[in-house]
Image: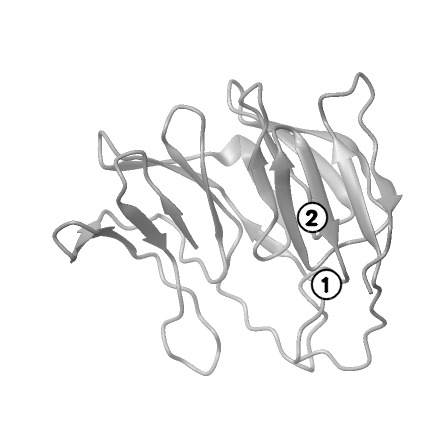
């Protein structure tokens, strides 16, 4: 997972240890694009493979999901056998990590995480249950369900999210996929996903 920090540097978290078991690593590194140099940040408390990094409204970075478990043809897809890890927050100014045990829950790998206009963080998929994380308490609430899981997502306007397609992976054969797309407008009084025109 990677994200740009407020000062223009790039934070890269987690990764693969090179083993055949797809074990994650706890490393965190920062790229300075001006000096073209990498520096090590403190390691996360949890090794993570396929995490998502999200820049919060205050400039800190939320890291969710990723784990040490192997996925392959003999295992259920990650949407079923999800990542059970504790999120962490990185402070660029203090150069420290903080674990968030109150925010721990089963999550998919590479969740679609976006910061809403009010500073809360939405998990828009690929899990079909949509949840919101409140940084003031680091607890989740459920917003609702989406008609598709989605292979990709984007916040195309503040608080407005589009996701499309079906979660898939070459390790899992014969998955039914869709060309459908759905949108969610969290700025509405009662936000709910709705299908829009399908992709070609």
* Residue 88, image x, y percentages: 42, 40
* Residue 133, image x, y percentages: 60, 30
Residue beneath the point at 72% across and 78% down: 172
- Please tell me whether residue 2 is drawn above or below residue 120 in the rendered image: below
Q: Residue furthest front?
A: 200
Quarter of the image that includes the C terminus: bottom right
Q: Secondary structure at mark 2?
A: loop
Mark 2: give few (<14), some (14-19) or many (20+) Cα within 10 Å: many
In which image quadrant can residue 118 be found?
top right
Q: Secondary structure at mark 1?
A: loop
Q: Is residue 113 left or right of residue 151?
A: left
Mark 1: give few (<14), some (14-19) or many (20+) Cα within 10 Å: many
Residue beneath the point at 65% across and 49% down: 153
Q: Which residue is mark 2?
A: 125
| Disc nearer the start of the sequence (2/1) | 2
Looking at the picture, tell me which residue is in the foreground, 20 or 111. 111
Residue 167's tag is 1
Residue beneath the point at 54% across and 20% down: 137
**Do the residues under discs 2 and 1 have CB atoms within 8 angstroms?**
yes
In space, the residues marked 2 and 1 are separated at their CA atoms by 9 Å
* Residue 25, image x, y percentages: 36, 62
């Amino acid at each position: 997972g990677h994200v740009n920090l407020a000062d223009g540097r790039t934070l890269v978290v987690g990764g693969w240890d090179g083993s055949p078991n797809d074990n994650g690593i706890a490393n965190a590194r920062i790229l300075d694009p001006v000096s073209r140099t990498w520096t090590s940040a403190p390691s996360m408390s949890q090794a993570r493979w396929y995490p998502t990094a999200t820049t919060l409204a205050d400039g800190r970075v939320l890291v969710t999901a990723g784990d040490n478990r192997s996925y392959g043809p003999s295992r259920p897809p990650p949407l079923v056998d999800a990542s059970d890890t504790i999120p962490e927050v990185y402070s660029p100014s203090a150069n420290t990590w903080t674990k968030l045990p109150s925010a721990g829950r089963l999550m998919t790998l590479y969740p679609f995480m976006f910061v809403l206009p009010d500073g809360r963080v939405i998990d828009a998929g690929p899990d079909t249950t949509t949840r919101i994380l409140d940084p003031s308490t680091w607890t989740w609430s459920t917003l609702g369900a989406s008609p598709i899981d989605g292979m990709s997502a984007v916040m195309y306007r503040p608080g407005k999210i589009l996701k499309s397609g079906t979660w898939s992976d070459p390790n899992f054969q014969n998955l039914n996929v869709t060309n459908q797309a759905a949108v969610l407008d969290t700025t509405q009084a009662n936000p709910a996903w709705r299908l829009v025109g399908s992709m070609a």
